[in-house]
Image (cartoon, rainbow, N blue to C red):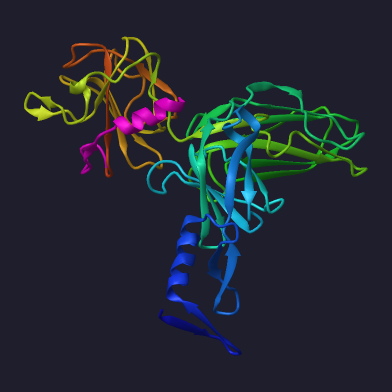
Amino acid sequence: MPTRTLRSSDDSVKISSRARALGTACLTAGIAAAALAPSASAGTGGATFVAMPQPSKVACVKDCKSRSAVRGGGSLKVAGKNLSGVSKVVFTGGPGRRDNVTVRVDPASDRSIKLKVPMRAPSGPLVVWAGSRAKATTKSVKVLPPPPPIKSAELTPSPGPSDPGAPALETGTSDNRFFHGERGGIEFKYRVGGNAPVKAQVQLLNQNNGATVMTWDAPEVAPGAVQSIRWTGKSAKGGAAPEGRYMFLLQVVDNAGLAARSATPDDARRDAFDFWHFVFPIKGKHNYGQGGAGFGAGRSGHSHQGHDVMANCGKKLVAARGGRVKVSSYHSRAGNYVVIDPVGDGNDHAYMHLARPASVEKGDRVYTNQQFGVVGTTGSSTACHLHFEMWSAPGWYDGGSPFDPLPYLRAWDAYS
């Protein structure tokens, strides 16, 4: 039997190629309790070995629909062997890595890991990583949408943790969802009890990753006075913040050093809201029509440049994304129509066959979710519907090209 020799500074070890192959097979399968996997070694330039993780069971422990189904924002427990070296767990969804979500973990023991489920984690197997190469895959886990945030625009007592004797807090948030570019932004209000001023800090937290997006500090807040903060959807660096769930978190400290919080950072519902970049443009029941309603369908002398969404005449039409009105006019084919250049998006949106002329004119500023008309059947149309187009930069008949808007419409429809 042929042999190979590995040499170090003070000894040599003979390893048979057959035994080496068997060891590699065990590593790949992850079936031996004592299996080891190579990992980069810091400072030596060589390699160290970590135990191959062997997860055997995944169970929901918080915000559960069942033992095997968890809501976003809830918690899971992974049980098994060789788990103390695990540094991250990846929620895998469909093919590829686009929808994968990674969670960093610090195992409680060699036999269990407890981890929080990100708000937008996909359903699918979990991949448990120890080091850079040792990994194992669990059975599929069903992840359901998180429960909706509590809608409470009025001030109500806050349930957050506080020191005995700390000032009482009341908070409220104007809505439980918010669209980028919507008029006025989203408002957070609070009121502090007691009889002396306090130091206050409000944080806006991205609950998908726990990051602090914005911070507002107030060195002296008078008791009994209602305070107000607004957020417009921009990140600290400018531009639209990522989509997801956010929350306002209030913390106050009085002159005696007693502290109070409006909620805990992992509260998925208190003073929380879901933030989206777009909204579905029809307010009411609708469907996506038959084959001829789709992009590219044949028409007399041309092809269909948008998608027809069927809805009753008179249903409200709103801007899917706020911006400037490029065109507001009438055409024999399009009927009453509007073209909007959305702020920060680059793709023009066209809305056609409105029942009446739009309530906006060329050059007007339009906000996301702002109504500008109603569904109709004007122009070359045989039924009530919205013909919706999307054009790439530089825009509608300005050098851009139309593309299929259906995937975008369906995505906006899913949460609107």
Q: Is residue 378 above or below residue 29?
A: above
Of 96 and 28, which appears nearest the observer?
28
* Percent of width and height locating residue 379: 18, 16
Of 105 and 200, which appears nearest the observer?
105
Q: Is residue 47 left or right of residue 159?
A: left
Q: Residue furthest bottom?
A: 10
* Percent of width and height locating residue 384: 26, 12
Q: Is residue 358 above or below residue 10?
A: above
* Percent of width and height locating residue 290: 22, 19
Q: Is residue 5 above or below residue 413?
A: below
Q: Is residue 121 visible?
A: yes
* Percent of width and height locating residue 147: 59, 26
In which quadrant of the rendered view does residue 367 lie? top left
| Residue 414 forms part of the magenta stretch | yes
Q: Is residue 242 visible?
A: no
Q: Which residues are magenta?
A: 395-416
Q: In what quadrant of the picture does the C terminus appear?
A: top left
Of 183 and 53, which appears nearest the observer?
53
- Determine the residue positioned at 62% across, 25% down: 174
Q: Is residue 45 above or below residue 376?
A: below
In which quadrant of the rendered view does residue 148 lie? top right
- Determine the residue positioned at 84% across, 36% down: 162
- Determine the residue positioned at 46% across, 65% down: 22
Q: In what quadrant of the picture does the N terminus appear?
A: bottom left
Q: Is residue 270 left or right of residue 37?
A: right
